């Protein structure tokens, strides 16, 4: 599953980088929780939670059904 998640994050990354941000995969747990680190302009951005849930989590769940949740870690 980690390879699938990595591929999807690669496709999302270009949109984040266009705004000066980025996302880094930290871990994928056995129960489908994807842990990511937002970096660059995304780190500390007031809209980062929306980006995480409405952008990253929605896309990952649509393309990798095994994903149950996406959470940001430091």
Image (spheres, grey):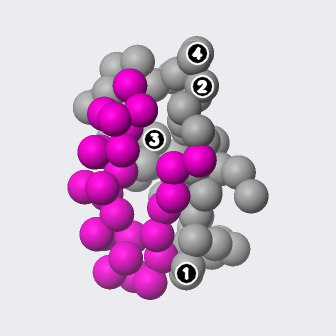
At mark 4, the secondary structure is loop
Residue drawn at x 32%, y 80% as measured from the top left:
18
Residue marked by disc 2 = 29
Tell me which label, 3 or 1, sits earlier in the chain.
1
Please say if 27 is above or below 16. above
Give the magenta range: 1-26
Q: Specify whether residue 22 is in view.
A: yes
For residue 57, the mark is 3
Task: Report the Cα–Cα distance between label 1 and label 2.
Answer: 26 Å
Q: CA distance from mark 1 to mark 4?
A: 30 Å
Instruction: Measuring from the top left, give residue 45's x and y in whole percent.
Output: 63, 75
Q: Which residue is labeled 4 in the image?
A: 31
Q: Tell me if mark 2 has few (under 14), some (14-19) or many (20+) residues whose alpha carbon lies within 10 angstroms of its own.
A: few
Sooner in the amino-acid sequence: mark 1 or mark 4:
4
Q: Is residue 37 magenta?
A: no
Relative side of 38 to 44, left or right: left
Q: Image quadrant for the N terminus?
A: top left
- Tell me the mark number nearer the camera, choosing from 1 and 4: 4
| Label 4 Cα neighbours within 10 Å, binned few <14 / some 14-19 / many ≥20 | few
Q: Which residue is mark 1?
A: 41
Residue 64 position in % (x across, y down): 32, 27
Quarter of the image for residue 37 reads: bottom right
Secondary structure mostly taken by the magenta-highlighted segment of the chain: helix
Query: From the viewer's perspective, is residue 8 above or below residue 68?
Result: below
Q: Earlier in the sequence, mark 4 or mark 3?
A: 4
Which corner quadrant holds the C terminus?
A: bottom right
* Residue 12 position within the rendered picture, expressed as x and y whole percent measured from the top left: 31, 57
Within the magenta stretch, is there residue 8?
yes
């Amino acid at each position: 599953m980690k390879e699938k998640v990595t591929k999807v994050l690669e496709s999302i990354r270009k949109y984040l980088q266009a705004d000066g941000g980025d996302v880094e995969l930290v871990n994928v747990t056995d129960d489908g929780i994807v842990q990511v680190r937002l970096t660059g302009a995304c780190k500390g951005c007031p809209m980062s939670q929306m980006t995480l849930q409405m952008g990253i989590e929605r896309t990952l769940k649509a393309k990798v059904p095994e994903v149950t949740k996406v959470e940001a870690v430091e």
